[in-house]
Amino acid sequence: MTDFVHPGLLFILGALPIPLLKGSVRKAYVLLIPTLAILAVLTMQPGDYGAAQFIQQEIIVAKVDKLSILFATVFSIMALIGMVYALHLTHAGQHVAAFVYVGSALGVVFAGDYLTLFLFWEGMTFASAYLVFAQRSDQALRAGFRYLMIHITGSIALLGGIILHGFATGSLLFGPIEGGLGLATCLILAGFLLNAAVPPLNAWLTDAYPEATVTGAVFMSAFTTKTAVYVLARAFPGTDLLVWLGIVMALYGVIYAVLENDCRRLLAYHIVSQVGYMVAGIGIGTEMAVNGAVSHAFAHILYKALLFMGAGAVIHVTGRRKLTELGGLYKTMPVTLALYMVGAFAISAFPFFSGFVTKSMVVAAAGQDHRALVVLALTMASSGTFLHTGLKLPYYMFFGTDQGLEAREPPRNMLVAMGMAAVLCIAIGMFPQTLYALLPHPVDFEPYIGVHVTESLGVLMFTALGFVIFLRALDPENTISIDTDWFYRMGARRFMWLAEKPLARYEKAVSDVSETAALPFLHGMALAGLRIDLHGVDAFVNAVARAILLGGGALRRLQSGVVTHYALAMIVGVIAGIAVFAVAWR
């Protein structure tokens, strides 16, 4: 690997000195590593790097092609933006966790075999969980443990699938999985789908992301689900099941966003919805659909991070995150509002913003593949996205009823990071060919044609009209929406009741019986065994030993060294033998 620098290792190894650095030196350092990673990605050449043999299997630490370079590029850029956003942090823990998280995501992107992929996959799980625990609230601790529980379960399924796949194929190399959905394939797919937050495996996302730290949520919105999109695009392109799962995701996230009062939880549901476009595109499997899916992942990382940064800025300044507690901030946070709206226009697929040039490619690919139902469902989801992320959330957060909150613009580094993401959202929308040149397949798609623009604007304008007409019906309510996390929340409570009540009582009863009946009996048996050993076995052994010693002494005395004595003994022995033979013969 002399001609290749792994950007993931730059982050993971680069995390080690961070706790030792202070002040401006640390700030410069945490910006330097992402910058070096961007340069490493831009200068790398396609090929396989770090090939080795392990347990008689071929291991490829880094497989570089256009797909991996695309994701590595946006991951490295997002790492730089995220670090700018987190510069104001004084404790090193979140910087370290973010570095390991980003490095592990890059490790997955370049993994050429399942073993390497799994190791980095686990690194992502534990590093991202720290970003939830770092909030240090009771809600965050509980959400963090649930997050770990769900992801470790998914990792077990993934590992089981990898082992079965290795036995079946004789290879651990990571690539397109051919054949039907056997047990190994289903387990691998389940592990990937969990990280993609496909319902009903999605509640970990909307449970944990709102409880993470302000800066931690920004990183989490960018990497875990998009890494899952990458592995699905690598291993399962053209799997028809993914089309229907993607549609469910797109609509499911939008519907649940209607019920949300927590601003970051609302944005988390729209992650589920937007990833649905990507999953559906991968399931369609045509070159245009896959291009649309991965380009939408690229754009989504940037605009979703911008939205989380905007919401995080409000939380950082006001300490509030519920829409019912916010309002009137447009007067004191106008820059934050403007930058947030760039992300809102991008996610809503407004023309000349990044979401338009990527989302429309997925919809167009569905149309070319004659999937009218998919086109309709994704269009409806796009309308819902604009309704809640582009209209409802900013209206009730920045406008709406003035709650009299004392607010100001967030620290300058947070605004700079938001500005960086906003510029990229606009640049991609204005110059889509720059992004299209990075895509894994040749691009034959022009987003700015009349039909695409008019369809998009028509949907958006009618959505805005509906928002104005039904504004009062959309007023947020101070409620909590329970998703499929209800099952493991309630399941965990039932398990704890079972462990603390029936099982504990059973264990106590067994212990009482053991202490009152079994233990005295065992003690008595042990004492009896000791007496038998001392007075029976030991006595017999000692008697045999004494007899052997006496016999040996007698034999020693018979060994006089006189030949006549030995001859006499031989004669006596022969006479004795003849006598015994005569008796036995008779």
Image: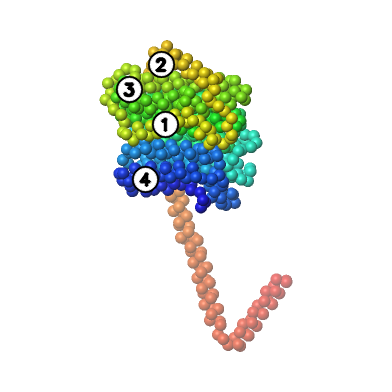
Do labels 2 and 4 touch, CB within 8 Å? Answer: no
Q: Nearer the viewer, mark 2 or mark 1?
A: 1
Q: On the picture, is 501 further left or further right than 47? A: left
Residue 436 visible in rendering: yes
Sequence-wise first label, 2 or 4: 4
Circle count: 4
Dot 1, how many residues are within 10 Å of its Cα: few (below 14), some (14-19), or many (20+)? Answer: some
Query: Residue 277 appears at what percent x and percent y?
Result: 53, 27
Look at 57% across and 39% down and name the residue there: 161
Q: Nearer the viewer, mark 1 or mark 3?
A: 1
Residue indicated by mark 2: 474
Query: Residue 29 appears at what percent x and percent y?
Result: 36, 45
Farthest residue in the top direction? 469
Q: Quadrant of the C terminus?
A: bottom right
Residue indicated by mark 3: 330
* CA distance for labels 1 and 3: 21 Å
The three-letter code of the residue at mark 1 reads Val
Do labels 4 and 3 touch, CB within 8 Å? Answer: no
Dot 4, how many residues are within 10 Å of its Cα: few (below 14), some (14-19), or many (20+)? Answer: some
Image quadrant where residue 570 sits:
bottom right
Residue indicated by mark 4: 29
Residue indicated by mark 1: 423
Look at 53% across and 78% down and name the residue there: 554
